[in-house]
């Protein structure tokens, strides 16, 4: 026999950003408790609205399963002392299992005898466990922020106001923070009313009758379909951003889409400002035309039905008008601020107490940028644009618009710079130097933006490392991992001829020029290389097997473009069955190469034709291999190395490497070492794993 189980926690409105994770956590904890309690069930569904979290478990067994198990203990050698009595280890095992040592049996496993004990436990009725189990789930839940209320010590995401706990039609008796469970849930705050849930299976429909759509997938489908219908009806392109849709989804219980409008005069403000104001402050979806230009309309989602939508739209229009008026005021006021005056204000904004002000950071960015342009051999026009971009890249941080909307940093800088008469390259560079802002974001398109972006990110990373701020575990308050990944992404996108160690050198030198380093240069270089190595490894792992990643990383990753090129080339090669025999030949070389002490091969000691032919082949392919490697032609370089296979096999088949003649032996080992040195410029082929 089986029954359905319903557990609903009714709350004051939760922050939208917490709800999905809380819903999934409740489901996972309920499922785990049922599993740990050996209570079988058919399926489990979760539900959530701003005011409730719930799980509905179908087909829950009315009784625990009976448990019969055998537990392995210590070996006979450990379980018995010299007198044949039970040892402390055996007695401790008995206590841990709640049995008497007389119940022990011995059984052989892989040639060794072990203690075994058989245990049986008869299952009890599920309903006798539910009260304690559900309370345990509640106490175990955790959230980014918790609340206490009244005089209770219990903490939860928001105060609990009601609970529904049903096993079949029977109420599960539990109480927490003064709230007792029952079978009455609450409908929509304004449109619904309290309603009795007679049985768990009625839950979703009972709430629907009270204007609550409990199923988040159904609620999301309602929102997206209504938006699509409106867009089709009005011939609009409604920009639905996923994170905003997610937030709106958990702000409503019954969604109804509507639209409003605003004065066209506001369109004189950059559309990024208007869109940000609508999205961030009002949770509105912007409306665009076919060309992506903003139209004077907005779309929002009401928490309710379709009554009095005109009145609701006018109320939203009034609120938005005030918001956009503020934005217009900020925008116009900001343009009265000269760039040089904005830069002087950066001197009073602390970047980090040990790294100085934002003004100090700008000076370091400029120095890094100038060194990087020299390293990359940029032309004079680029050098000039980079210098000016680096000098003014942070000026918009003191504007009112960016103070109101921090996510517009760079966006406003580009706009204000253009209006102040800066060149297109400089204005665009100000915007681009923040890119990529997050995983999957675009990298700077221009060389100017790329150089200043790397200089900025490198300054932050090196600065933090210089004062001992190194990300550990999940802790990365300054976003150093993201910024390092951004640098790697820019290098790869633009195929920049620059080594990571060169970047570290210039950044460390810049910091040392402006302030005393707390750590040695050697320590910082080592830590920075390891830190960036993890970012390079992650980039390779997105399209290469783990063993291919290990192999090419083993040959070095200072040159990011090279290691990714080698990874791609090797990944193509390992897909070909015949490449395994090539690697076997490489492996024979590497196994003996470590025994070499000489570094130079003497041709006059190559007496056997096979060794002479191998040396000749190595001499032939080496210049081309190195040119291919330097030119990032990984496939060509690997083909050159692979051409050694036949000569290598002939060498091992016909030559005794470890001959008694020491000179000849060491010369042959030197030959293998010379080959191995070339191989290891491409990859450590010994790390490849073959099926």
Image (spheres, helix red, strand yellow):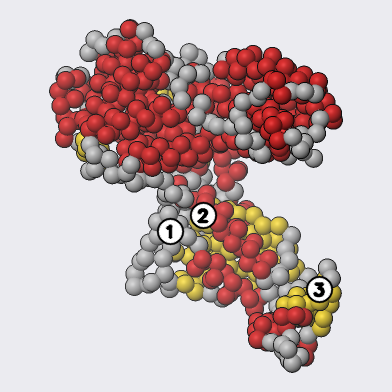
The residue beneath circle 2 is: 22
Q: Residues within 10 Å of mark 1 (few under 14, many from 20)?
A: many
The residue depicted at 33 percent of the width and 42 percent of the height is: 520
Locate residue 500, reporting x and y percent: 45, 29
Pointer 3 or 1: first along the chain = 3
The residue beneath circle 1 is: 157
* Residue 175 in view: yes
Q: CA distance from mark 1 to mark 2?
A: 9 Å
Q: Nearer the viewer, residue 631 or 132?
A: 631
Q: CA distance from mark 3 to mark 2?
A: 48 Å
Q: Is residue 417 above or below residue 229?
A: above
Task: Choose top left, top right, bottom left or bottom right for residue 382.
Answer: top left
Left or right: where does residue 117 sit relative to residue 677? right
Q: For the residue labelled by badge 1, is the local secondary structure a helix, a strand or a loop?
A: loop
Q: Foreground mark, 3 or 1? A: 3
The residue beneath circle 3 is: 112
Left or right: where does residue 225 sit relative to residue 189? right
Q: Is residue 655 above or below residue 475?
A: above
CB-based contact (under 8 Å), mark 1 and mark 2: yes
Task: Choose top left, top right, bottom left or bottom right for residue 271.
Answer: top left
CB-based contact (under 8 Å), mark 3 and mark 1: no
The residue depicted at 60 percent of the width and 43 percent of the height is: 217
Q: Say which quadrant the N terminus sits in.
A: bottom right
Locate residue 488, reporting x and y percent: 48, 28
Q: For the residue labelled by badge 2, is the local secondary structure a helix, a strand or a loop?
A: helix
Task: Choose top left, top right, bottom left or bottom right for residue 202.
Answer: bottom right
The residue depicted at 82 percent of the width and 81 percent of the height is: 106
Q: Say which quadrant the C terminus sits in.
A: top right
């Amino acid at each position: 026999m089986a029954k359905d189980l319903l557990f609903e926690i009714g709350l004051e409105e939760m922050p939208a950003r917490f709800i999905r994770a809380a819903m999934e956590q409740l489901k996972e904890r309920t499922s785990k408790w049922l599993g740990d309690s050996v209570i079988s069930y058919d399926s489990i569904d979760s539900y959530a609205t701003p005011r409730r979290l719930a799980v509905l478990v179908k087909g829950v067994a009315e009784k625990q399963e009976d448990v019969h198990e055998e537990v392995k203990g210590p070996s006979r050698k450990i379980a018995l002392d010299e007198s044949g009595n039970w040892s402390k280890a055996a007695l401790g095992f008995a206590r841990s299992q709640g049995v008497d040592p007389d119940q022990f049996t011995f059984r052989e496993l892989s040639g060794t005898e072990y203690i075994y004990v058989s245990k049986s436990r008869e299952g009890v009725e599920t309903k006798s466990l539910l009260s304690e189990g559900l309370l345990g789930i509640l106490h175990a839940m955790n959230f980014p922020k918790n609340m206490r209320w009244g005089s209770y010590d219990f903490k939860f995401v928001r105060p609990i106001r009601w609970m529904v706990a049903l096993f079949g039609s029977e109420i599960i008796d539990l109480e927490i923070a003064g709230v007792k469970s029952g079978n009455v849930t609450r409908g929509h705050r304004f449109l619904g009313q309290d309603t009795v849930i007679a049985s768990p299976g009625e839950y979703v429909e009972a709430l629907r009758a009270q204007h609550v759509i409990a199923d988040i997938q159904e609620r999301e489908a309602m929102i997206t379909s209504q938006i699509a219908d409106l867009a089709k009806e009005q011939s609009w392109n409604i920009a639905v951003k996923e994170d905003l849709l997610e937030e709106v989804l958990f702000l409503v219980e019954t969604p109804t889409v509507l639209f409003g409008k605003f004065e066209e005069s506001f369109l004189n403000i950059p559309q990024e400002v208007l869109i940000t104001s609508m999205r961030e402050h009002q949770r509105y979806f912007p409306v665009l035309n076919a060309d992506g230009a903003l139209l004077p309309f907005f779309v929002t989602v009401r928490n309710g039905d379709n009554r009095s939508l005109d009145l609701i739209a006018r109320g939203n229009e009034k609120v938005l008008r005030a918001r956009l008026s503020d934005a217009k005021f900020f925008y116009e006021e900001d343009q009265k601020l000269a760039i040089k005056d904005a830069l002087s204000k950066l001197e009073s904004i602390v970047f980090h107490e040990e790294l100085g002000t934002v003004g100090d950071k700008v000076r370091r960015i400029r120095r890094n940028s100038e060194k990087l342009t020299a390293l990359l051999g940029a032309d004079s026009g680029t050098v000039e644009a980079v210098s000016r971009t680096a000098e003014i890249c942070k000026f918009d941080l003191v504007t009112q618009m960016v103070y109101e909307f921090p996510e517009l940093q760079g966006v406003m800088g580009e706009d204000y710079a253009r209006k102040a008469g800066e060149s297109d390259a400089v204005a665009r560079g100000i915007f681009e130097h923040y890119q990529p802002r997050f995983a999957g974001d675009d990298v700077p398109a221009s060389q100017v933006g790329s150089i200043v972006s790397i200089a900025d990110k490198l300054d932050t990373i090196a600065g933090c490392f210089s004062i001992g701020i190194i990300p550990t575990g999940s802790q990365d308050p300054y976003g150093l991992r993201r910024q390092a990944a951004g640098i790697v992404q820019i290098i790869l996108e633009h195929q920049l001829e620059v080594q990571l160690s060169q970047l570290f050198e210039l950044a460390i030198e810049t910091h040392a020029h402006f302030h005393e380093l707390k750590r040695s240069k050697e320590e910082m270089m080592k830590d920075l290389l390891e830190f960036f190595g993890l970012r390079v490894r992650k980039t390779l792992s997105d399209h290469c097997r783990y063993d291919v990643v290990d192999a090419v990383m083993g040959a070095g990753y200072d040159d990011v473009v090279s290691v990714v090129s080698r990874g791609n080339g090797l990944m193509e090669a390992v897909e070909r069955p015949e490449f395994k025999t090539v690697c076997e030949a490489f492996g024979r070389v590497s196994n003996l190469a470590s025994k070499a002490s000489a570094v130079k091969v003497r041709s006059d000691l190559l007496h056997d034709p096979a060794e002479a032919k191998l040396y000749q082949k190595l001499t032939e392919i080496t210049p081309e291999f190195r040119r291919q490697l330097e030119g990032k032609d990984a496939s060509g370089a690997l083909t050159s190395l692979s051409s050694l296979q036949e000569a290598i096999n002939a060498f091992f088949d016909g030559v005794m490497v470890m001959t008694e003649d020491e000179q000849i032996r060491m010369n042959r080992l030197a030959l293998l070492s010379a080959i191995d040195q070339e191989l290891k410029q491409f990859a450590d082929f010994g790390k490849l794993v073959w099926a």
